[in-house]
Image (tube, rainbow, N blue to C red):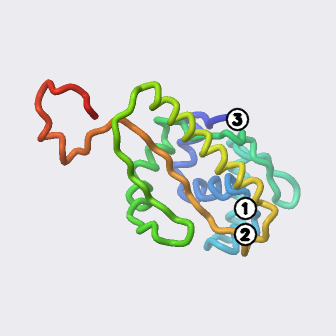
Amino acid sequence: MQELTLEQERALVHDRRLLLLATCCLSLWTLEQIVGFYRLTEAEVVQGLVQLDRLGIIELRPLNRYRLRLAKTFRWRPNGPAMQYFRDEVLMDYFSGHFDGDAETLTLVHGQIGRGQAQLLNERLLKLAEDFAQQHLADQRLPAEQKRAFTLVLAMRSWLFAAFRDLKRDGSGSAF
């Protein structure tokens, strides 16, 4: 499954713990890892895994193991409930960090490029996201103490910063 249905996303966003468990499953965490890291009991995690199974996000297996029913190229619905939740609740928290930790970076680049080049850059960004997902899968064989959780946010848009909009001349075109 490339993306969830609207109903599946709504169910996740409606329940913070279920969204957390879905995120843990996307990261391929075991039940033991989830219970060891979060203040959730084994029973709470199992209950959540059952809900995720009923939603069709995972296939629950014996001994509380699971298989993701999502494609390696899974993405949230572009204007769906999960991305709206991300915009409303997560973005500010994410970008409020200093990005000065080991292997962290924040780069802002501005420029004017042709539409064709913009499309090519978007394709390269999608490829980078795929590379990140593939590395995540490849590193599953590493011991937990050799891994850290990272979140990669990629975005590119034609945009004029709100603080500059009132300074723009009327009818001056779309330089941004």
Can you give x and y, in whole percent of width and height, for residue 92 in the image? 38, 58
The structure residue drawn at horizontal position 79% and vertical position 46%, both measured from the top left corner, is 59
Describe the element under mark 2 as helix, strand or loop.
helix
Q: Amino acid at mark 1?
A: Trp
Describe the element under mark 1 as helix, strand or loop.
loop
In the drawing, does residue 110 fall left or right of residue 81? left
Label 3: which residue? Answer: 1
Q: Quadrant of residue 172?
A: top left
Q: Amino acid at mark 3?
A: Met
CB atoms of marks 2 and 1 within 8 Å: yes
Describe the element under mark 3 as helix, strand or loop.
loop
Disc on res. 33: 2
> Dot 2: few (<14), some (14–19), or many (≥20) neighbours within 10 Å?
few
CB atoms of marks 1 and 3 within 8 Å: no
Q: Earlier in the sequence, mark 1 or mark 3?
A: 3
Q: Amino acid at mark 2?
A: Gln
Label 1: which residue? Answer: 29
In the drawing, does residue 63 fall left or right of residue 54? right
